[in-house]
């Protein structure tokens, strides 16, 4: 594949223009990721933008805003997080450069995309970050513990996502949805909006929803196999 070089000075300038607080040590792995995304995108059409600059401002910038949002949610010090339908690693790959807490599993059914994710991890060495290749249902079957946090970006319509994730999320956990509109005023029981954040990226408004199951301890057993205090 043709080599695509990301100018590190221009990268630092564009990152600063997003208004996000991105540590200096994240710039090099971010540059590697963008270079690989450009290379693989030509063969696999991973994302819509073709230049690394557009990829950064239109797609990666979401991760810059998501990191402090997740840090502000009440979660264990080492949360277990699942990223459903990870695709090209957005938001997961850049997110882990800024938010390395706990264990993070990117679930992707498409083989080539999962291979891309694994290749990126082999170059960037992100802490406790893993790839599962296969349907999300198969991933769920192999998990002993419920998740503290489940992240979704355009994986499926949000109403279906609520039903899918409810039995797999801890009572104190959060389902975080990346959306192009605010969270609805009313959610199906037992869900509630725990937190919400709006921001602007590439000139358009975007939102994070953090949804939690508002269930008494006894009722939770109707939906799930029980609670555990350990991590992954």
Image (tube, rainbow, N blue to C red):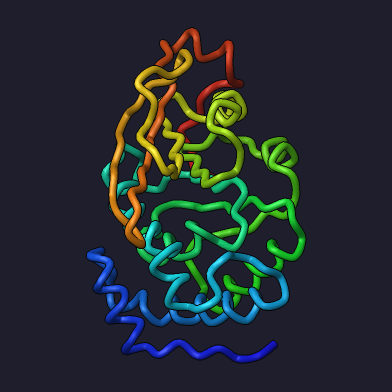
**Count of marks overlaid on the render:** 0
User: Whole-percent x and y of residue 65?
Assistant: 32, 55
Q: Residue at x 52, y 43 (%)?
A: 152
User: Residue 84 versus residue 122: which sits nearer the camera?
Assistant: 84
User: Whole-percent x and y of residue 148?
Assistant: 45, 37
User: Residue 86 versus residue 187: which sits nearer the camera?
Assistant: 187
Q: Residue at x 44, y 52 (%)?
A: 102
Vertical side of 190 occupied by 129: above or below: below
Vertical side of 13 occupied by 196: above or below: above
User: Whole-percent x and y of residue 13?
Assistant: 27, 81
Please state, as top left, top right, bottom left or bottom right, where the C terminus lies in the image: top right
Query: Dividing the picture into quarters, in which one does residue 176 lie?
Result: top left
Vertical side of 98 occupied by 11: above or below: below
Q: Residue at x 25, y 63 (%)?
A: 20
User: Left or right: where does residue 106 sit relative to residue 138?
Assistant: left
Please state, as top left, top right, bottom left or bottom right, where the N terminus lies in the image: bottom right
User: Left or right: where does residue 82 sit relative to residue 194?
Assistant: right
User: Whole-percent x and y of residue 230?
Assistant: 48, 38
Query: Dividing the picture into quarters, in which one does residue 132 lie?
Result: bottom right
User: Left or right: where does residue 35 sit relative to residue 108?
Assistant: left
User: Left or right: where does residue 93 sit relative to residue 113?
Assistant: left
Vertical side of 184 occupied by 127: above or below: below
Query: Dividing the picture into quarters, in which one does residue 22 lie?
Result: bottom left
Q: Residue at x 36, y 41 (%)?
A: 76
Q: Residue furthest top?
A: 218
């Amino acid at each position: 594949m043709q080599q695509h070089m990301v100018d590190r000075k221009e990268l630092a300038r564009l990152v600063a223009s997003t208004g996000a607080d991105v540590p200096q040590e994240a710039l090099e792995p971010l540059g590697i990721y963008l270079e690989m995304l450009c290379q693989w995108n030509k063969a696999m059409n991973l994302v819509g933008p073709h230049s690394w600059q557009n990829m950064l401002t239109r797609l990666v910038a979401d991760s810059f805003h998501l990191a402090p949002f997740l840090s502000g949610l009440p979660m264990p010090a080492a949360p277990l997080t699942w990223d459903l339908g990870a695709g090209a690693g957005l938001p997961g790959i850049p997110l882990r450069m800024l938010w390395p807490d706990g264990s993070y599993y990117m679930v992707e059914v498409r083989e080539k995309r999962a291979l891309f994710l694994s290749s990126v991890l082999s170059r960037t060495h992100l802490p406790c970050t893993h790839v599962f290749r296969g349907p999300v249902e198969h991933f769920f079957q192999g998990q002993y513990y419920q998740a503290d946090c489940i992240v979704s970006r355009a994986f499926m319509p949000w109403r279906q996502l609520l039903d899918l994730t409810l039995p797999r999320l801890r009572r104190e956990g959060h389902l975080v949805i990346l959306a192009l509109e605010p969270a609805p005023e009313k959610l199906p029981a037992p869900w509630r909006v725990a937190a919400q954040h709006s921001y602007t990226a590439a000139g358009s408004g975007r939102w994070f929803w953090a949804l939690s199951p508002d269930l008494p301890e006894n009722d939770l057993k109707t939906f799930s196999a029980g609670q555990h205090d350990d991590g992954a």
